[in-house]
Image (spheres, rainbow, N blue to C red):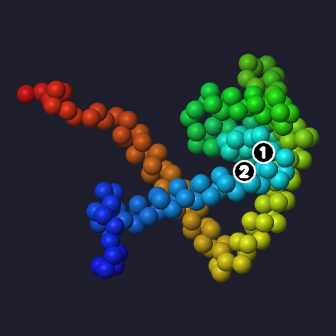
């Protein structure tokens, strides 16, 4: 931080905290911009009725062209709200974008993209390539920057997860809980 300017943030008491806070706010802004981009693209390809999470689930199901269970989808998206994922799966199935299949010899179900779901995800991929990916290729050393950013975000994901586990074992200390 330059001495001429400073931010009086409760989250940033030193240079490291300032940089981390800047990164966190940048990630939040990037997420919101991504959500707006997806909604705009979905409008063009005929998926405007989907919420952002449903859009992501549809693409995850299509990933590697093999069926996925709700638990696998949750794991791939780093989500722990399986009931919400199941609701989204029912919605995608009702819209005709995916079909539910019972795994042979089990009580488990998997989901596969339908012909219409494949067409819509192909249309989205084509639009994404034309509008978004093409712009990225103009950034100097983009491939290296992308690899570094992906590695950093992956590392941060693990650290945030570990901190979440650690914090879940803590209790807030208040004066009525103190033992003499």
Name which residue lies at 73% across and 18% down: 107
Q: Of label 2 and label 1, which has the lower sequence position?
A: 2
Quadrant of the image containing the N terminus: bottom left
The answer to whether the residue labelled 2 contacts the one labelled 1, judged by CB atoms less than 8 Å apart, is yes
* Residue at position x 85%, y 59% in the image: 126
Instruction: State the residue in front, 141 or 86.
Output: 86
| Image quarter of residue 167 | top left
Q: Any mark on residue 48, and which?
A: 1
On the image, the x and y values in percent for residue 86 come to 68, 28
Q: Secondary structure at mark 2?
A: helix
Local SS, label 1? loop
Q: Position of residue 97 (x, y in %)?
A: 84, 37
92 versus 16 height, above or below = above
Classify residue 102 as left or right of residue 152.
right
Please, which residue is most extreme toward the left here?
A: 180
Position of 168 relative to 8 (above/below): above
Residue 68 lies in quadrant? top right
**Residue that label 2 marks:** 39
The answer, for residue 8, to whether it is visible in the render is yes
Q: Residue at x 82, y 60 (%)?
A: 127
Q: Is residue 159 left or right of residue 54?
A: left
Q: Is residue 143 left or right of residue 95?
A: left
31 to the left or right of 137: left
Out of 81 and 102, give the one closest to the viewer: 81
Q: Is residue 138 above or below residue 152?
A: below
């Amino acid at each position: 931080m330059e001495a001429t300017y400073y931010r009086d943030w409760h989250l940033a008491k030193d240079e490291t905290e300032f940089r981390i806070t800047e990164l966190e706010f940048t990630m939040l802004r990037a997420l919101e911009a991504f959500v707006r981009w997806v909604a705009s693209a979905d409008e063009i390809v005929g998926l405007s009725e989907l919420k952002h999470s449903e859009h992501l689930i549809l693409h995850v199901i299509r990933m590697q062209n093999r069926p996925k269970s709700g638990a696998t989808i949750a794991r791939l998206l780093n989500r722990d709200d399986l009931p919400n994922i199941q609701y989204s799966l029912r919605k995608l199935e009702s819209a005709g974008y995916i079909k539910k299949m019972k795994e042979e010899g089990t009580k488990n179900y998997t989901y596969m993209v339908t012909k219409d779901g494949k067409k819509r995800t192909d249309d989205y991929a084509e639009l994404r390539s034309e509008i978004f990916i093409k712009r990225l290729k103009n950034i100097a050393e983009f491939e290296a920057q992308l690899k570094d950013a992906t590695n950093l975000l992956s590392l941060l994901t693990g650290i945030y997860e570990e901190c979440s586990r650690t914090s879940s074992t803590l209790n807030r200390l208040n004066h009525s809980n103190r033992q003499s």
